Amino acid sequence: MKAVIAHAWAAGLLAALAAPAGAQERAGPESGGPELIGGVFEHGSNFHPLGSRFTLPKLPPGQFYEDSGEDGTVDLQIGYRTAPLRRIPLKPRLTTKAQVSTAGRTSFLSFGSEFRQHVFGGRLYGQAGIGITIHDGYRFTPDPIVPGLSPAEAQRRYDIYFRRVGFGSRVLFNPNASVGVRLSPRWAAEVAWEHFSHRQIFSDRNPGIDHLGVRLVRMLGR
């Protein structure tokens, strides 16, 4: 999957570079063309807007939260948004996003839609979306305390337990939100939140994970 994501990243960058220079002059802040996005995210941020509290308290040294082994690492994200579908209520944009872990943790590939509202003459906008995600991580991490394991196998499983998350499903949902500001007719910057979980639909195990990051957005086409 990571090879596919890398190829998608390269293809997206080539598409951005190949866009006609003259088109930049014709695009306005709300012209609604397709977009290429790229950004950097904190993988496993201590931010949980869908949970019972926004943040978790810091633990004493030597203690940790279960399923926190991927927290604090760095992801790179690239994606593509279509122009708004103007014949559909709320004019959603269809999206595809690849979020790649730079630390050997879980990477995500998502497909969905996003809904945008501009204010201040198009200079600022808010956006919310929902999608379906597949990932290359663990559905269930291996149990490190099974009787009869060799020391080497037990250590391998403990390493996985402390460094990875078992999501309980290969397919996850991706609610997300962002706030963007127009830097020019062609460019915008966003602060974004991405969440991945399955709400215990596919199994009882559902730790979920949240990411916070920043993105650059380039409008394509005319």
Image (cartoon, helix red, strand yellow):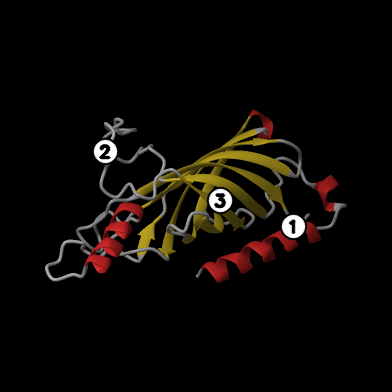
Q: Nearer the viewer, mark 3 or mark 2?
A: 2
Q: Earlier in the sequence, mark 3 or mark 2?
A: 2
Please, what is the three-letter code of the amino acid marked with disc 1? Ala
Q: Secondary structure at mark 3?
A: loop
Give the residue type that dot 2 points to.
Gly
Label 1 SS: helix
**Picture coordinates of residue 27, whole percent (x, y):** 78, 46
Tell me which residue sits at (70%, 49%) in the image. Answer: 218
Residue 6, how many percent across, how many down? Answer: 60, 65
In the rendered structure, the answer to whether residue 62 lies left or right of residue 174 reads left
Q: Which residue is mark 2?
A: 62
Q: Would you say the residues marked 2 and 1 are in contact, meaning their CB atoms lie under 8 Å apart? A: no
Residue positioned 23% across, 64% down in the render: 154
Kindly identify the residue that appears in the image at 36 percent across and 60 percent down: 172
Which element carries disc 2, helix, strand or loop? loop
Q: Does 168 appear above or below 37?
A: below
In three-dimensional space, the C-alpha distance between marks 2 and 1, rounded to whole angstroms, equals 46 Å
For the residue carrying disc 2, how many other residues have a C-alpha within 10 Å: few (<14), some (14-19), or many (20+)?
few
Disc on res. 6: none
The residue tagged 3 is 91
Give x and y (percent) for residue 210.
Answer: 40, 45
How far across and how far down the image is residue 94, in percent?
Answer: 55, 58
Of labels 2 and 1, earlier in sequence is 1
Give the residue pinned by disc 1: 16
Asked whether the viewer can see residue 140, the reply is no
Q: Which label lies toward us, 1 or 3?
A: 1
Q: Is residue 86 left or right of residue 18?
A: left
Quick check: 219 left or right of 104?
Answer: right
